[in-house]
Image (spheres, helix red, strand yellow):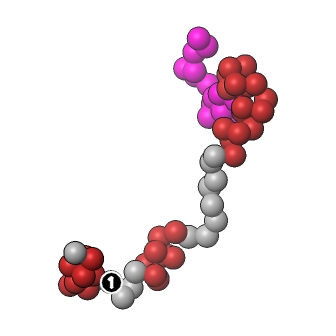
Amino acid sequence: MQTVQNKSDHQIKLLGYQILKNELGISGLIRFMQQFDTGHGNYVKDREEWQKEYDVDSLVTAINDLK
């Protein structure tokens, strides 16, 4: 196993890709990488917008309505 001490984040990422390629093959590496999506936009701002009408009482009522 290669040591990661004193390596930059970029070097660690490249080493990780190399190890994954060696273990999974190129198609496995690609499939692995496709599982990760950093997304776009500002999740916190978007969440605040779609949750602005929620409060504890309305959530409790909605939960009780499911019973």
Say whether residue 33 is left or right of residue 51: right
Quadrant of the image containing the N terminus: top right
- Give 38 or 57, whichever is nearer the viewer: 57
Location of residue 28 (image quadrant): top right
Quadrant of the image containing the C terminus: bottom left
Q: What residue is rendered at 55% in x and 20% in y?
A: 5
Say whether residue 27 is left or right of residue 57: right
The extreme right residue here reads 26
For the question of whether residue 11 can be seen, the reply is: no
Q: Position of residue 12 (x, y in %)?
A: 63, 29
For the question of whether residue 20 can be seen, the reply is: yes
Residue with the mark numbered 1: 54
Q: Position of residue 50 (x, y in %)?
A: 46, 81
Q: What amino acid is at disc 1?
A: Tyr
Q: Determine the secondary structure under disc 1.
A: loop
Range of residues picked out in magenta: 1-17
Q: Is residue 4 magenta?
A: yes
